[in-house]
């Protein structure tokens, strides 16, 4: 590698790190402003001020507030998917993995801070965006469902996701949380729907 190429790559790496840090600041600031403003829509000026950045920087990374809201939602889904993946990794049986996914997803409602944030973010959408947003959570279900003998693991994954996110939405909107019997019932319901029992 020539010294010129190495110098350019170092400069690009530094700019990329700076861009990632700036986007992270904007996302964190947006979440804080959304929580304070909900259910009213947050103002870009408030987000920019909270992030300690500028309008020019904001619009360098986001086309507008709607795109930022989707990015905040995507970040939340990605964090939840990572948590669910960790929970599933502690189980070996596919039915147990499915149970861990359901229990882990519903446990998010039991965390008051997380529930308040979810409520605030979701209040910014008149309807949930398309399934691409929740794909990281849904895709975790396909492996266990396939191992359990599902004839159509993708559709079964969609059905489980719809059932559980619907329940989460209901609990989040009412600021309540499922008790262990509710969680157990939803686990048994989903396992029965795909022809399995809890192990």
Image (cartoon, helix red, strand yellow):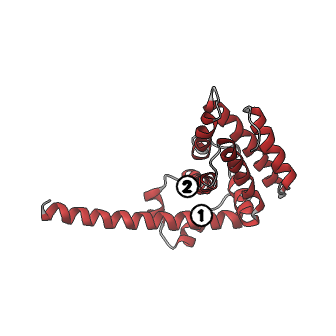
Q: Residue at x 64, y 51 (%)?
A: 91
Task: Compute the Cα span from label 2 to label 1.
Answer: 8 Å
Residue holding disc 2: 68
Q: Position of residue 4 (x, y in %)?
A: 14, 63
Report x, y in % for residue 185: 84, 45
- Are the residues at dot 2 and dot 1 in contact (C-beta closer than 8 Å)? yes
**For residue 1, what is the image quadrant?**
bottom left
Q: Residue at x 65, y 61 (%)?
A: 42
From the viewer's perspective, tell me whether residue 127 is left or right of residue 10: right
Indicate the secondary structure of the residue bearing disc 2: helix
Task: Please name whichever residue, 99 or 91, is drawn nearer the observer in this view of the structure.
Answer: 91
Crowd rating for badge 2 (residues with CA inside 10 Å; few <14, some 14–19, many 20+): many
Left or right relative to 163: residue 81: left
Q: Which residue is mark 1?
A: 30
- Quadrant holding the C terminus: top right
Callout 1 secondary element? helix
Residue 113, percent across and down? 72, 66
Is residue 179 positioned above or below 52 on the image?
Answer: above
Residue 40 seen in this snapshot? no
Q: Residue 32: tell me if it is visible.
A: yes
Using a 10 Å C-alpha cutoff, classify the residue at mark 1 as few (fewer than 14 neighbours), some (14 to 19) or many (20 or more).
many
In this rendering, would 121 be left or right of 171? left
Q: Is residue 84 above or below residue 141?
A: below
């Amino acid at each position: 590698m020539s010294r010129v190429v190495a110098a350019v790559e170092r400069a690009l790496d530094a700019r990329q790190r700076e861009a990632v840090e700036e986007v992270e600041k904007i996302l964190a600031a947006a979440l804080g402003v959304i929580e304070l403003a909900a259910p009213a829509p947050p103002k870009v000026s408030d987000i920019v001020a909270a992030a300690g950045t500028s309008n020019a920087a904001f619009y360098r990374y986001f086309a507008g507030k709607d795109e930022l809201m989707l990015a905040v939602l995507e970040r939340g889904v990605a964090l939840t998917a990572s948590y669910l993946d960790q929970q599933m990794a502690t189980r070996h049986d596919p039915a147990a993995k499915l149970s861990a996914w359901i229990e882990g997803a519903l446990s998010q409602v039991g965390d008051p801070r997380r529930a308040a944030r979810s409520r605030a973010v979701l209040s910014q959408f008149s309807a949930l965006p398309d399934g691409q947003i929740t794909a990281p959570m849904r895709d975790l279900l396909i492996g266990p469902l396939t191992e359990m003998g599902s004839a159509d693991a993708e559709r079964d994954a969609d059905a489980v996701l719809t059932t559980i996110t619907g329940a989460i939405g209901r609990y989040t909107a009412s600021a309540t949380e499922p008790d262990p019997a509710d969680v157990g019932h939803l686990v048994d319901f989903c396992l029965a729907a795909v022809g399995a029992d809890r192990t």
